[in-house]
């Protein structure tokens, strides 16, 4: 007889070979979590190799889900439950499983050969290695094959349904209704009835297994989290970013053009936008990164919202063309979904190490706005803001996301397009002529030059990479004009109206301030909550606009005795803040290819707070 126990939060990680369907199982359980109404955050992790040798640590794929009955901001630290489909998955993930946590594994995979592949001299299922955990070593493969008996599947095909068997067991354990997953399988494999029936049979077998599994006396439930009224959906950062760009184009009454070259982890933006060509979106998969941004610049010249998406290596290749966009002063959004570098680095791992590149990575004086998204859902709003600035101020804008945000997912309150800020392209017309002459570099109050559509009578003008004469746009090598144009382009960026930096300091008496940017928002917020729960006092402030910085940034930094800048690099924002405001800020750096650990960071903060108090 099982009892039902209520928990506030749970972290589950599915892990196995890249062909074991761990991403599918994790995503499916996440979808069920949406229906239950929990708050959640996910962290998929993929092997960098296209197809690593089966059963090796290099080939392990995982999907972590943190779900709760309250507001959460990260995919969690240590998993409470680890589903490890083979010895490689156990080897790669066991160190993260919390002591006393639950381990579910496929016992049939723990053969002498598979154990040797990952360096196990003895079987961890029997040698005492797992004494600190609740272990359920189950013949998942054998049960999956048995569930498909009579369906006519080959043994290898039937074995591939073991991910659904594991999902069924987890669904039972956490009180998920089976109907939604069974309906999903009906839809997904509608054209392959045998595969559909085998997966459904495996899922049902796993669900039923929970009732009979020895040692399982408790089922769990996590109540719904409080939420604002509205329509919610599960969304990843890359999908949200694509929707934000589409919404901005629609609000500005512009067609959207994306020029891109496939690169991890930004490719999903191209995938998302290529499927909505009926919504005024055109996508172009270029032969290389330079062609991709060149096409996007051409689209902007023609009066569309030009966008290009990439990751760090692609940003390096696009640098000269970004400089051209600065010189042309045309709208352009450059999306950098950052990954661990340098060079190819760890292409499936996350990092924040492109900030210097975004701020300074061009030849010449080539200033442009830089903004960063803070969560998967915030990717929508950051993309919308980047497009608004680009269109209204006639400038390229760099939008920084990263692999953690791009691939991760969370609940997202779908906004009403009518409530989003207006975006006004204000194309040049004949009324902009001055004494019958069009001056393509005559600026408005925002410092933006006219946006003239090619072919408009009377608005003929020259563009190109050579320096422009003020007002006329003619090619100019005059030293004084060059200095003036550099100052005008810089002034346009400096004059952007960005929101003030907001400080979260509940008691208004903290001595320590943590500053972050981009995806560190979630871990910083989670760590600050732990510090406050332990009796510590800490303030937090998060930067979205990185160039220009909010006008009150210096005042905020000088308000605190100790300033800590937390980022997933070796101190790039720290250097900017020290140089700009002459504050003795201190780093908390994290370059592990993973989000900052809230538990480790909170422990660090408690130490710092104790030092300040002594």
Image (spheres, rainbow, N blue to C red):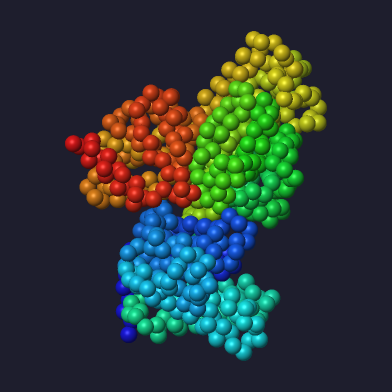
Q: Residue furthest left?
A: 614
Question: 426 or 28, which is in the foreground?
Answer: 28
Residue 182 located left or right of residue 500: right
**Above or below 473: residue 357:** below
Residue 550 located left or right of residue 286: left
Question: 31 or 2, which is in the foreground?
Answer: 2
Residue 97 position within the rendered picture, expressed as x and y whole percent measured from the top left: 38, 63
Question: 230 or 257, which is in the foreground?
Answer: 257
Residue 597 located left or right of residue 463: left
Residue 247 position within the rendered picture, expressed as x and y whole percent measured from the top left: 60, 47
**Above or below 427: residue 339:** below
Image quadrant where residue 432 sits: top right
Does residue 210 appear in this view?
yes
Does residue 439 appear in this view?
no
**Above or below 586: residue 166:** below
Look at the image and tell me in which quarter the N terminus lies: bottom left
Count of labels shown? 0
**Above or below 299: residue 141:** below
Look at the image and tell me in which quarter the C terminus lies: top left
Q: Residue furthest bottom?
A: 150
Residue 556 position within the rendered picture, expressed as x and y whole percent measured from the top left: 35, 30
Look at 64% across and 48% down and name the residue there: 263
Look at 49% across and 33% down and name the residue there: 546
Residue 48 position within the rendered picture, expressed as x and y whole percent measured from the top left: 58, 55
Question: 308 or 130, which is in the foreground?
Answer: 130
Look at 63% across and 86% down and name the residue there: 151
Image quadrant where residue 12 sits: bottom left
Look at 51% across and 83% down and name the residue there: 143
Image quadrant where residue 260 sits: top right
């Amino acid at each position: 007889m099982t009892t039902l126990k209520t928990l506030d939060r749970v972290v589950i990680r599915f892990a196995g070979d890249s062909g074991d369907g761990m991403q599918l199982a994790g995503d499916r359980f996440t979808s069920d979590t949406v229906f239950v109404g929990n708050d959640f955050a996910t962290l998929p992790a993929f092997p960098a190799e296209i197809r690593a040798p089966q059963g090796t640590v290099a080939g392990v794929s995982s999907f972590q889900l943190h779900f709760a009955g309250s507001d959460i901001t990260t995919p969690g630290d240590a998993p409470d439950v680890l589903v490890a489909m083979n010895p490689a998955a156990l080897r790669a993930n066991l160190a993260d499983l919390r002591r006393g946590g639950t381990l579910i594994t496929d016992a049939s995979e723990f053969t002498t050969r598979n154990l040797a592949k990952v360096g196990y001299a003895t079987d961890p299922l029997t040698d005492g290695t797992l004494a600190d955990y609740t272990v359920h070593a189950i013949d998942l493969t054998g049960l999956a094959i048995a569930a498909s008996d009579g369906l006519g599947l080959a043994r290898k095909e039937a074995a591939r349904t073991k991910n659904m068997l594991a999902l069924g067991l987890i669904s039972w354990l956490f009180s998920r209704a089976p109907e939604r997953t069974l309906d999903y399988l009906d839809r997904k494999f509608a054209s392959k009835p045998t595969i559909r029936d085998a997966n459904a049979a495996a899922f049902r077998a796993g669900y039923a297994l929970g009732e009979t599994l020895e040692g399982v006396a408790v089922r769990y439930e996590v109540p719904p989290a409080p939420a604002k009224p509205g329509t919610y959906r599960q969304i990843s950062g890359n999908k949200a970013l694509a929707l934000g760009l589409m919404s901005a184009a629609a609000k500005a009454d512009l067609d959207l053009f994306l020029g891109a070259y496939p690169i991890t982890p930004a490719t999903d933006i191209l995938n998302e936008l290529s499927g909505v060509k009926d919504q005024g979106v055109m996508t172009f998969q270029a032969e290389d990164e330079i062609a991709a941004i060149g096409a996007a610049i051409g689209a902007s010249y023609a009066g569309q919202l030009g966008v290009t998406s990439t990751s760090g290596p692609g940003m390096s290749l696009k640098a000269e063309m970004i400089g051209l966009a600065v010189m042309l002063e045309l709208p352009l959004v450059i999306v950098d979904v950052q990954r661990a570098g340098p060079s190819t680095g760890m292409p499936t791992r996350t990092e924040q190490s492109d900030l210097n590149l975004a701020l300074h990575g061009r030849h010449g004086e080539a200033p442009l706005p830089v903004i960063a998204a803070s969560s998967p859902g915030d990717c929508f709003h950051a993309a919308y803001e980047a497009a608004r600035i680009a269109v209204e101020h006639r400038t390229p804008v760099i939008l920084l996301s990263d692999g953690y945000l791009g691939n991760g997912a969370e609940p997202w309150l779908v906004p009403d397009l009518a409530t989003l800020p207006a975006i006004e392209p204000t194309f040049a017309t004949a009324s902009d002529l001055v004494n019958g002459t069009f001056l393509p570099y005559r600026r408005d109050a925002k410092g933006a030059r006219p946006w003239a559509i090619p072919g408009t009578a009377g608005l003929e003008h020259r563009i190109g990479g050579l320096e422009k004469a003020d007002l006329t746009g003619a090619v100019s090598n005059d030293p004084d004009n060059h200095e003036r144009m550099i100052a005008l382009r810089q002034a346009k960026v400096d004059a952007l109206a960005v929101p003030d930096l907001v400080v979260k300091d509940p008691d208004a008496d903290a001595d320590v301030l943590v500053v972050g940017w981009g995806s560190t928002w979630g871990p910083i917020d989670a760590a600050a909550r732990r510090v406050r729960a332990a009796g510590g006092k800490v303030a937090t402030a998060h930067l979205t606009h990185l160039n220009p910085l909010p006008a009150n940034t210096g005042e905020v930094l000088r308000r605190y005795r100790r300033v800590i800048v937390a980022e997933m690099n070796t101190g790039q924002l720290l250097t900017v803040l020290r140089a700009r405001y002459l504050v003795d800020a201190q780093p908390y750096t994290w370059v592990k290819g993973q989000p900052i650990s809230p538990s480790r960071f909170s422990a660090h903060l408690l130490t710092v707070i104790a030092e300040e108090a002594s």
